[in-house]
Amino acid sequence: MEKINIADILEFTAEKSARKAIFKAGSLDTGLLLYAPGQTTPDHKHSDIDEVFYVISGKGTISINKEEISVKEKDIIFSPAGETHGFHNTSSDNWVVLQIKIDISSKE
């Protein structure tokens, strides 16, 4: 077992958003998405990865297949493989999102 305190890995930069890895094992990959005010990740998709996004703190917008969805602390979103998604911190505070990725390419 491994334990990490999220507060210990929060590092926001003014230049661009960041992803801080937490745990990776087999088909599971977890990390924190860190957005300072105004930062974005452009729309993109993964053909072989299901993702779950859980808002730890702050608020912003997640676009899912071009539809913008406002999210805030304690909201959770599921984005299955092949679905387009992107992120935008629309607030004046930092935004922290837990990302859980599951590689489904090895499923039979």
Image (cartoon, grey):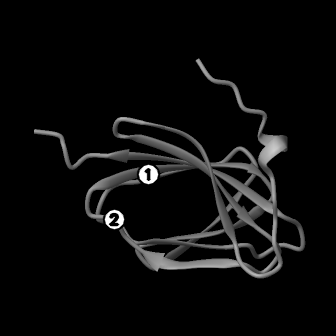
Residue in the picture at 72% in, 32% down: 4
Q: Secondary structure at mark 1?
A: strand
Residue 69 vs 102, above or below: the answer is below
Q: Which mark is residue 1?
A: none
Q: Position of residue 102 (x, y in %)?
A: 37, 44
Left or right: 43 in relation to 62: left
Left or right: 58 in relation to 102: right
Amino acid, disc 1: Glu
Residue 2, picture quadrant: top right
Q: Which mark is residue 51?
A: 1
Q: CA distance from mark 1 to mark 2?
A: 9 Å
Q: Which mark is residue 46?
A: 2
Residue 45 vs 4, above or below: the answer is below
Q: Classify the position of the C terminus by image quarter.
A: top left
Q: Position of residue 94 (x, y in %)?
A: 84, 64
Please name whichever residue, 82 or 24, is drawn nearer the observer in this view of the structure.
Answer: 24
Q: Secondary structure at mark 2?
A: loop
Q: Position of residue 33 (x, y in %)?
A: 65, 59
Q: Residues within 10 Å of mark 2 (few under 14, many from 20)?
A: some
Amino acid, disc 2: His
Q: Are marks 1 and 2 in contact (CB under 8 Å)?
A: yes
Please name whichever residue, 48 or 21, is drawn nearer the observer in this view of the structure.
Answer: 21
Residue in the picture at 69% in, 25% down: 3
Please name whichever residue, 83 or 27, is drawn nearer the observer in this view of the structure.
Answer: 27
Residue in the picture at 72% in, 62% down: 34
Q: Residues within 10 Å of mark 1 (few under 14, many from 20)?
A: many
